[in-house]
Amino acid sequence: MPSSRTHGATHPRDALFAGEKPFPVIPACEHFAGSERLIAKALELQAKMGALFDVTCDCEDGAEAGKEKQHAEMIVDVLTSPKNTLGMAGVRIHDYTHAHWKKDVDILVAGAGTKLAYVTLPKSTSAAQVAGMIAYVRSVSAKEEDRPRDPGARAGGNARGAERRLGHRGARGACRCSISGSWIS
């Protein structure tokens, strides 16, 4: 990171974190897209404009009722394709009360692996829900890490990479949570 000296003064970032690994840059904006066409268009725009915004592939509002599995599989296909050039795309899974939220995690973590930048946990109403969802993501990641990989499989990387990207071991990734309309990371 370049020095931030202005008129001989040292920027606090340089004084406090000199020689340390820099914090990741996280865009302040994210674009939600629910259909294959809109996800591809958002990824194309992101590639053209640079790392200005994240793309959130929406399982919750994007999936047609009864076709949740196919929708999650479509997201895996798009995120593991060359369209995801910057690796700055995540997913919003179904909320805790929806019967498909665990299946979303199973499909997306196993299929997209290191290509997932984050997972958004929507409409949480308690810390216990958030804790349960994060624990499930971690358990699926651990299972995927131990599973032998088929060299021809479509998954982009392994679950260790997914955990790293989802924030359990790495710097940028996170589970984003919405509790009663207030966003926390």
Image (cartoon, helix red, strand yellow):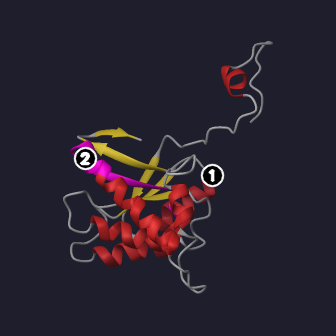
At 57% across and 72% down in the image, what residue appears?
Answer: 156
Give left or right: position of 158 versus 74.
right
Q: Secondary structure at mark 2?
A: helix
Q: Is residue 152 above or below residue 125?
A: below
x then y, percent, for residue 78 = 49, 72
Q: The N terminus appears in which quarter of the rendering?
A: top right
Q: Secondary structure at mark 1?
A: loop
Determine if residue 57 is in view: no
Q: Is residue 117 magenta?
A: yes
Determine if residue 22 is in view: yes
- Packing grade of label 1 (10 A; few <14, some 14-19, many >=20) is few
Give left or right: position of 79 versus 135.
right
At 76% across and 13% down in the image, what residue appears?
Answer: 9
Count of labels shown?
Answer: 2
x then y, percent, for residue 170 = 57, 50
Is there a contact, CB below 8 Å, between mark 2 and mark 1? no
| Cα–Cα gap, marks 2 and 1 | 37 Å
Mark 2: which amino acid? Answer: Ala
Q: Residue furthest front?
A: 146
Tag of residue 50: 1
Residue 46 figure quarter: bottom right
Q: Which residue is mark 2?
A: 128
Q: Is residue 40 above or below residue 153?
A: above
The magenta stretch is: 115-131
Task: Judge depth for marks 2 and 1 and give the one in front.
Answer: 2
x then y, percent, for residue 94 = 28, 61
x then y, percent, for residue 123 = 25, 49
Mark 1: which amino acid? Answer: Gly
At 39% across and 73% down in the image, what residue appears?
Answer: 107
